[in-house]
């Protein structure tokens, strides 16, 4: 008869996510994970597999968490510019217990090029983000809210690049005035 878990799988996965987010993949040892998650080594391997599998699950948890903070983009009556602004502001605003920056961007910089399956997850998410931005830009262009002088795909690529850069910059400064001025300058391109 199988033993029931003596811990909440989702709670300890969140703890792993927070540790990877604050320390990075390479710097986080299995011992760090065991201590942070508050479980035994055997339980970690039995439940999550190896470090890379646990990291992928933690990164997926992070992406799910982000979705809950993103504004509703399906409501076509909502103006587009405030939605795009909110996406950028989410890079700046963080919960008190959250590390600075973005786990997805950290992953892209640290290990995506060395680990194919992690890199594929990052590339897929970047592609989804660009498609989301392109759909928002197209909608804004169709209503006249966003200038049609630039191709929607090109503008989406630019916005995604700027959004990614902002998520790196927030790790280097606490100067909110500077960060919000970057958002303002970037979004002026939509006029």
Image: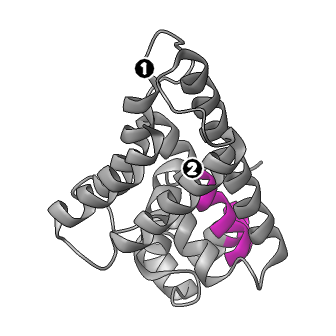
Looking at the image, is mark 1 or mark 2 nearer the viewer? 1
Would residue 106 be found to the left or right of residue 99 on screen? right
Q: Which residue is mark 1?
A: 79
Total marks in image: 2
Q: Which residue is mark 2?
A: 63
Q: Residues within 10 Å of mark 1 (few under 14, many from 20)?
A: some
Depth check, front residue: 178 or 110: 178
Q: Position of residue 94 (x, y in %)?
A: 29, 54
The residue at the point 28 percent across, 52 percent down is 93
State the SS at label 1. Answer: loop
Would residue 77 be found to the left or right of residue 42 on screen? left
Magenta span dominant secondary structure: helix
The residue at the point 78 percent across, 80 percent down is 115
- Vertical relation: 75 (above or below) 93: above
Q: Are marks 1 and 2 in contact (CB under 8 Å)?
A: no
Depth check, front residue: 156 or 12: 156
The residue at the point 58 percent across, 30 percent down is 136
Residue 48 among magenta residues = yes
> Is residue 9 in view from this perspective?
no
Depth check, front residue: 55 or 176: 176
Depth check, front residue: 17 or 89: 89
Would residue 5 be found to the left or right of residue 14 on screen? right
Q: Position of residue 91 (x, y in %)?
A: 38, 55
Identify the magenta region: 45-61
Which comes sooner in the sequence, label 1 or label 2? 2
The image quadrant of residue 166 is bottom left
> Is residue 89 in view from this perspective?
yes
Q: Residues within 10 Å of mark 2 (few under 14, many from 20)?
A: some
């Amino acid at each position: 008869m199988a033993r029931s878990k003596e811990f909440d799988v989702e709670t300890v996965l969140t703890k792993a996510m927070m540790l990877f987010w604050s320390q990075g993949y390479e710097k986080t040892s299995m011992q760090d994970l065991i201590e942070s998650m508050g479980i035994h080594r055997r339980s970690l391997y039995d439940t999550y597999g190896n470090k890379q599998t646990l990291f992928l699950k933690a990164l997926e948890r992070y992406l799910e968490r982000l979705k809950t903070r993103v504004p509703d983009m399906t409501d076509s009556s909502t103006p587009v510019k405030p939605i795009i602004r909110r996406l950028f502001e989410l890079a700046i605003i963080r919960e008190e217990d959250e590390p600075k920056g973005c786990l997805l961007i950290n992953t892209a910089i640290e290990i995506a090029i060395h680990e194919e399956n992690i890199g594929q997850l990052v590339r897929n998410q970047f592609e989804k983000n660009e498609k989301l931005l392109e759909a928002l830009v197209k909608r804004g262009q169709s209503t006249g809210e966003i200038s049609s002088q630039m191709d929607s795909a090109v503008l989406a690529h630019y916005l995604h690049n700027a959004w990614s850069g902002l998520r790196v910059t927030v790790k280097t400064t606490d100067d909110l005035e500077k960060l919000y001025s970057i958002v303002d300058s970037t979004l002026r391109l939509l006029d």
